[in-house]
């Protein structure tokens, strides 16, 4: 089956007509919130599955939003088709149809490299615009000038992501919230931090402390709870680890955080829907206090 035929079948299954129109980026709607936050899954949680399956699994976990990552296979039937900012309008339409059918809102995309050349960077922003995303996640500090120009043009936020401290690569600085803050200084306020709680913990940092350092600059959150502060720590069910998720949620609320929280469960890869659902339940329950 050719790509056009397959996508047509997806659209028919979802009962949605093909539409290539784009929309301007906008705030995340209030009805996408659970416990006071727009929480759902980073599709990387389901990276052993396709993007269409990741949308289904996010819905099954009780999430209302999703963050895509570049290069996920498009469907179980066609794992060689990749979904990213090079996707055709037909592929994007099929993903939009699946989102609508499952009641999920796409809100973010990353971690994606954004080139310094404007033409290459614009492809990422155009993709985000077509999906009406709230934000883009990157670590491309070297492209900050181009990013700032396009943030102003497209009114789409960009969050700088942190991976963990790299002992073998002392030049890597994104793990340090103070360095990220220095990158954001004097930049457009729509440029901020994608706060990855798990990588902060793996760097020996307390997430609540990091959030306070970056106050007013949090664009999005990658939600993890970890079994320790060690470099080899791994995800465990939300609320049972060292990340102080209750404290994180309280701090985000204090900062009037309005971005997305993406559950990024990097453990139990084949059967993580229950773990993701537990995270959604934790946020819902904490919000009800």
Image: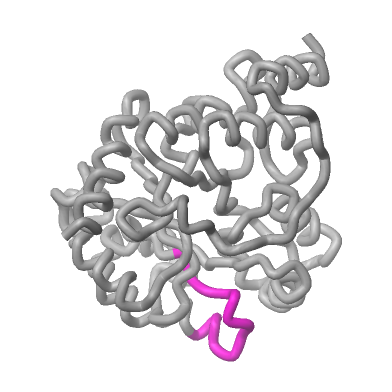
Q: Residue most toward the top?
A: 1
Q: Is residue 277 above or below residue 204?
A: above
Please state the horizontal and vertical placement of residue 13, each as a whole percent of the image. Answer: 65, 16
Residue at 36 percent of width and 24 percent of height: 270
Q: Residue 78 versus residue 164: which sits nearer the camera?
A: 78
Query: Picture coordinates of residue 262 (x, y %)?
Result: 42, 51
- The quarter holding residue 252 reads bottom left
> Which is more toward the observer, 111 or 3?
3
Asked whether residue 212 appears in the rendered view, the answer is: yes
Quadrant including the N terminus: top right
Q: Residue at x 16, y 60 (%)?
A: 289
Q: Left of 288 or right of it: where is 267? A: right
Q: From this viewpoint, which residue is outermost toward the right?
A: 119
Q: In percent of the image, x 63 and y 13: which residue is there?
A: 77
Q: Which residues are magenta?
A: 182-194
At 39% from the left and 75% from the top, the residue drawn is 256
Residue 189 forms part of the magenta stretch = yes
Say if 25 sits above or below 94 in the image: below
Residue 24 image offset from top left, x and y in percent = 73, 60
């Amino acid at each position: 089956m050719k790509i056009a035929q397959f996508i047509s079948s997806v659209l028919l299954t979802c009962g949605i007509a093909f539409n290539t129109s784009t929309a301007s980026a906008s705030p995340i709607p209030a009805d996408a919130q659970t416990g006071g936050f727009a929480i759902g899954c980073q599709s990387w949680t389901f990276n052993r599955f396709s993007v269409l399956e990741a949308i289904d699994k996010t819905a099954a976990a009780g999430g209302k939003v999703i963050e895509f990552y570049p290069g996920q296979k498009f469907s179980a039937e066609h794992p060689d088709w990749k979904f990213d900012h090079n996707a055709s309008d037909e592929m994007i339409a099929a993903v939009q149809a699946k989102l609508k059918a499952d009641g999920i809102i796409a809100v973010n995309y990353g971690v994606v490299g954004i080139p310094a050349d404007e033409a290459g960077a614009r492809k990422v922003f155009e993709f985000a615009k077509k999906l009406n995303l709230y934000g883009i996640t990157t670590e491309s500090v070297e492209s900050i000038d181009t990013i700032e120009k396009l943030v102003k043009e497209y009114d789409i936020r960009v969050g700088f992501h942190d991976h963990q401290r790299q002992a073998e690569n002392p030049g890597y600085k994104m793990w340090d919230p103070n360095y990220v803050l220095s990158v954001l200084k004097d930049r457009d306020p729509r440029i901020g931090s994608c706060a990855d709680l798990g990588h902060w913990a793996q760097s020996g940092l307390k997430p609540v402390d990091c959030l306070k350092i970056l106050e007013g600059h949090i664009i999005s959150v990658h939600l993890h709870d970890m079994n320790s502060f060690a470099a080899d720590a791994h995800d465990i069910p939300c609320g049972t680890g060292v990340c102080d998720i209750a404290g994180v949620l309280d701090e985000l609320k204090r900062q009037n955080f309005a971005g997305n929280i993406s559950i990024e469960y990097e453990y139990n890869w084949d059967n993580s829907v229950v773990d993701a659902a537990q995270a959604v339940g934790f946020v819902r329950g904490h919000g009800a206090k």
